[in-house]
């Protein structure tokens, strides 16, 4: 089990209930084989540059521990989820 950090951006035109459903879907994937350390919905913010004609998005930050299988499944689902416009998973290195 390694430490990871996930940041993803949800489209700004998505309803609040759908945002909550997307967040719960990804939490379910992580909890299935890992553990969530910290979870923050940072809210709607302006993007640094336009992505798919969107100027802002809802940012979500998750710190978790999991195996590589969970991370691979999470990456796969993030890629096919239409509500997510960008995502990044980073493995935290302990010095």
Image (spheres, rainbow, N blue to C red):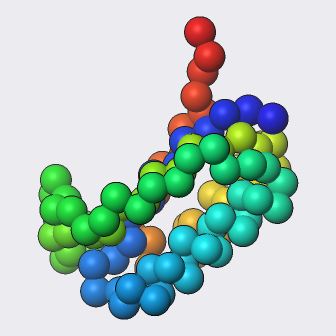
Residue 86 in sight: no
| Residue drawn at x 33%, y 77% as measured from the top left | 11
Instruction: Return the x and y of residue 13 as percentages of the image width and height.
Output: 28, 86
Tell how many labels: 0
Q: Is residue 94 left or right of residue 10?
A: right
Residue 14 in sight: yes
Instruction: Return the x and y of residue 10 as percentages of the image width and height.
Output: 39, 72
| Residue drawn at x 72%, y 58% as measured from the top left | 30
Quadrant of the rendered image containing residue 19: bottom left
Q: Is residue 79 left or right of residue 56?
A: right
Between 38 and 82, the one nearer to me in the picture: 38
| Residue drawn at x 56%, y 47% as measured from the top left | 38
Instruction: Return the x and y of residue 86 as percentages of the image width and height.
Output: 40, 61
Q: Is residue 57 above or below residue 4?
A: below
Split into 4 quadrants, where in the image is the N terminus? top right
Residue sitting at the far top: 95
Q: Is residue 70 above or below residue 53?
A: above
| Residue drawn at x 59%, y 9% as measured from the top left | 95
Q: Is residue 61 left or right of residue 55?
A: right
Q: Is residue 4 above or below residue 54?
A: above
């Amino acid at each position: 089990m390694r430490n990871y950090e996930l940041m993803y951006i949800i489209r700004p035109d998505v309803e609040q209930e759908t945002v909550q459903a997307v967040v719960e879907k990804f939490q379910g994937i992580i909890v299935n084989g890992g553990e969530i350390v910290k979870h923050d919905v940072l809210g709607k913010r302006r993007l640094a540059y336009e992505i798919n004609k969107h100027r802002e998005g809802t940012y979500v930050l998750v710190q978790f521990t999991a195996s590589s299988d969970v991370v691979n499944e999470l990456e796969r689902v993030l890629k096919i989820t239409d509500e997510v416009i960008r995502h990044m998973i980073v493995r935290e290195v302990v010095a």
